[in-house]
């Protein structure tokens, strides 16, 4: 499945969390002269925002420069009973299923690389922005007992899985309003058999009969793609075609008025050689072409691009196939890739270390931003476009490569810049290195800036409500024992980092920490979970004036990787939610903050099928209400997303692989 979050876009429930005015100054003082500071002399775009304010950025996302805005076409009225010349699939004798790849070179050469001249252009005719597919199984054998192979159910299920995959996700390059499709319904028409060989007119007559008697949705009220699946062994009158899509004008009845109004009916037919793979491969070809060119007047090849007759469409220059969600599909031409592609929704890896993810204020919905170390050198930034119906990931965008290899990373979106800069602290050897990325339009990563040393393991950075601007608070394992804590005074022009404050030395060597500012205390206590020797220990620091770290308090055992702690919008107070790897898969723990004793739950295992998880990051997103939990986990050299719905099921979903 593609990320099922998209089914779950509830409005964000306003959090009950009280708004902190945060006028207090940060802890301590006068300690900032002890570190060597290495800052850019001028910090760009310093525009403080209201604390906790969500900026509705008009900049959708930084990386969409390649996608031209295309205006909605004016839908042309169809006049007369015209039969399109049709887009066809030529029959082939062999089906080779290549591994799923983002970019598959077309057979027969002639493929340019990315940036090659476009092969297709937009003629401005209608497209199907959100195709609603009505399957029509024609032939008596579809009603047989036992069912034929493939059965109507198998074909229908496979098409749902295809539609729910990232397969259609590259079509919006041709018309920006093209989004997700859906399966409208299924009709079994077993009263007759298609003639062998059948013509387009046979198919049209059958559809008109079903439209007239109300067996199919009225095209006057909804735009539907009628996809006719033939029984095995029935061929087209043109034996070189195994599938086709086209349209005809139908005089649709306006109920109650006796008036008939001509509307275009878009349809396709798909022949059946008795294998599910063949049916879905042909169906996929007709689907992408029906979406991008239902009437032969929209996305069409430039002169000379196609060698066959009929409409020259994006499926007609591609013969490779792939498999998505277990379903065989055909590749289609992507001008932006300069290749035939089967979009699989994944981006390139490999990665190492731990991922760090935030939901940023970039985009309308708020994109996911993820930073993770690369195995060779430097760090990679990935982002997920949450305004894209396919929630596509982009990247990797490497930075910091010249400064060597990094083992761990932490990230926030701060209130510097608008809608907010990304701020990263990463561990290189035993050094603490700082990077930041401006809010655009340049989106440059700045750094590396060394801010400390003598550390190892996974750090945690937050922007707190201490100070006027909101200080940075940073915790990480010391390279020998315990936890090192720094804070950056963001109310001073020089933005000095404090000297380190040590605590938790009794734990010995600590592997990882995760830290939040909660809504306990005023402006909010710091709460920290530390992983040491497979055990999780909790610490917290009051909001002042003592600023004393309390702990360790033992919380859990048998943990085998980095931990992530957040305060969620579940519960009245806001529960603590924690995820950590066990020997196999992951475990969710939560602390009931509405119970005065604040009990931690036992571990709730999930993702046990993925084996050992190395590290992870967690957020509560604004998908669902009050917000789904989203975990990006590194499993070996790959990243995968897990997410938990907001209830009532509270079910963990995934893995949805993010990187290949
Ligand atoms: Zn075609």
Image: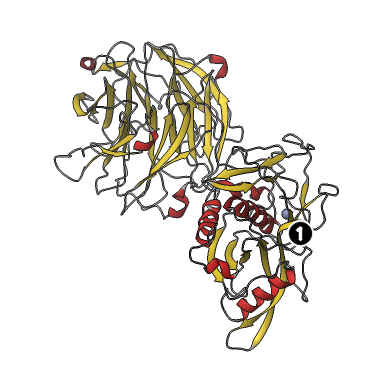
Q: Can residue 39 be seen? A: no
Q: Is residue 482 left or right of residue 125?
A: left
Q: Residues within 10 Å of mark 1 (few under 14, many from 20)?
A: few
Residue that mark 1 sits on: 239
Q: Nearer the viewer, residue 629 or 248?
A: 248
Task: Name the one closer to the observer, 64 or 652.
Answer: 652
Residue 441 in sight in this render: yes
Q: Quadrant of residue 653?
A: top left
Q: Quadrant of ligand 1?
A: bottom right
Q: Position of residue 170 (x, y in %)?
A: 63, 46
* Total numbered labels: 1
Q: Position of residue 130 (x, y in %)?
A: 59, 59
**Residue at 55% across, 23% down:** 446
Residue 128 in percent (x, y) is at: 65, 60
Is residue 341 placed above or below 156 in the rendered structure?
A: above
**Left or right of 173 in this view: 429:** left
Which residue is drawn at the image coordinates 26% and 19% (left, top)? 533
């Amino acid at each position: 499945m593609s990320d099922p979050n998209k089914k779950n876009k509830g409005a964000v429930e306003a959090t009950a969390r009280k708004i902190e005015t945060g006028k207090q100054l940060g802890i301590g003082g006068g300690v900032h002269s002890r570190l060597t500071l290495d800052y850019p002399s001028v910090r760009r775009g310093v525009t403080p925002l209201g604390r906790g304010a969500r900026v509705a950025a008009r900049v959708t996302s930084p990386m969409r420069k390649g996608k031209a805005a295309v205006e909605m076409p004016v839908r042309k009225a169809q006049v007369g009973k015209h039969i399109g010349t049709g887009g066809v699939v030529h029959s082939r004798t062999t089906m080779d299923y290549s591994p799923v790849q983002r970019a598959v070179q077309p057979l027969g050469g002639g493929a340019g690389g990315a940036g090659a001249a476009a092969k297709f252009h937009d003629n401005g005719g209608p497209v199907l922005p959100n195709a609603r597919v009505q399957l029509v199984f024609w032939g008596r054998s579809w009603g047989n007992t036992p069912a034929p192979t493939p059965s109507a159910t198998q074909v229908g299920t496979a098409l749902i899985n295809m539609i729910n995959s990232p397969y259609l996700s590259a079509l919006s390059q041709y018309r920006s309003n093209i989004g997700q499709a859906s399966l409208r319904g299924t009709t079994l028409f077993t009263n007759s058999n298609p003639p062998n060989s059948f013509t387009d007119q046979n198919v049209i007559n059958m559809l008109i009969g079903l439209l007239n008697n109300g067996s199919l949705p009225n095209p006057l009220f909804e735009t539907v793609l009628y996809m006719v699946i033939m029984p095995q062994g029935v061929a087209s009158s043109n034996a070189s075609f195994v599938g086709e899509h086209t349209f005809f004008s139908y005089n649709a009845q306006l109920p109650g008025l006796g008036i008939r109004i001509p509307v275009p009916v878009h349809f396709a037919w798909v022949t059946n050689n008795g294998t599910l793979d063949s049916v879905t491969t042909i169906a996929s070809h007709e689907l992408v072409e029906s979406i991008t060119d239902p009437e032969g007047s929209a996305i069409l090849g430039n002169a000379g691009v196609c060698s066959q007759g009929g409409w020259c469409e994006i499926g007609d220059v591609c013969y490779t196939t792939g498999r998505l969600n277990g379903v065989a599909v055909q590749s289609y031409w992507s001008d932006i890739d300069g290749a035939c592609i089967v979009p699989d929704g994944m981006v390139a890896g490999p990665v190492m270390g731990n991922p760090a993810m935030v939901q940023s204020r970039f985009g309308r919905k708020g994109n996911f931003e993820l930073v993770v170390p690369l195995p060779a050198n430097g760090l990679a930034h990935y982002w997920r476009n949450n305004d894209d119906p396919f929630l596509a990931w982009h990247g990797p965008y490497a930075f910091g490569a010249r400064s060597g290899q990094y083992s761990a990373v932490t990230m926030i979106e701060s209130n510097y810049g608008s809608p907010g800069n990304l701020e990263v602290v990463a561990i290189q050897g035993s050094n603490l290195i700082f990077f930041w990325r401006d809010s655009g339009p340049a989106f440059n990563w700045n750094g590396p800036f060394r801010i400390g040393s003598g550390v190892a393991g996974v750090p945690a950075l937050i922007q707190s409500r201490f100070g006027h601007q909101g200080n940075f608070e940073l915790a990480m394992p010391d390279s020998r024992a315990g936890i090192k804590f720094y804070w950056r005074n963001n109310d001073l022009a020089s933005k000095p980092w404090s000297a380190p404050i040590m605590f938790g030395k009794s734990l010995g060597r600590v592997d990882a920490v995760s830290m939040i500012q909660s809504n306990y205390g005023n402006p909010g206590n710091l709460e920290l979970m530390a992983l040491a020797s497979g055990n999780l220990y909790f610490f917290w620091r009051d909001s002042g004036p003592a600023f004393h770290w309390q702990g360790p308090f033992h919380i859990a055992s048998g943990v085998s990787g980095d931990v992530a702690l957040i305060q969620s919008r579940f519960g009245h107070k806001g529960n603590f939610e924690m995820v950590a790897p066990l020997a196999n898969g992951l475990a969710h723990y939560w602390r009931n903050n509405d119970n005065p004793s604040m009990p931690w739950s036992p571990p709730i295992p999930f993702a046990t099928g993925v084996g050992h998880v190395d590290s992870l990051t967690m957020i509560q997103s604004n998908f669902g209400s009050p917000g789904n939990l989203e975990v990006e986990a590194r499993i070996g050299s790959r990243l995968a997303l897990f997410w938990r719905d907001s209830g009532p099921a509270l079910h963990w979903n995934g893995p949805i692989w993010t990187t290949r």
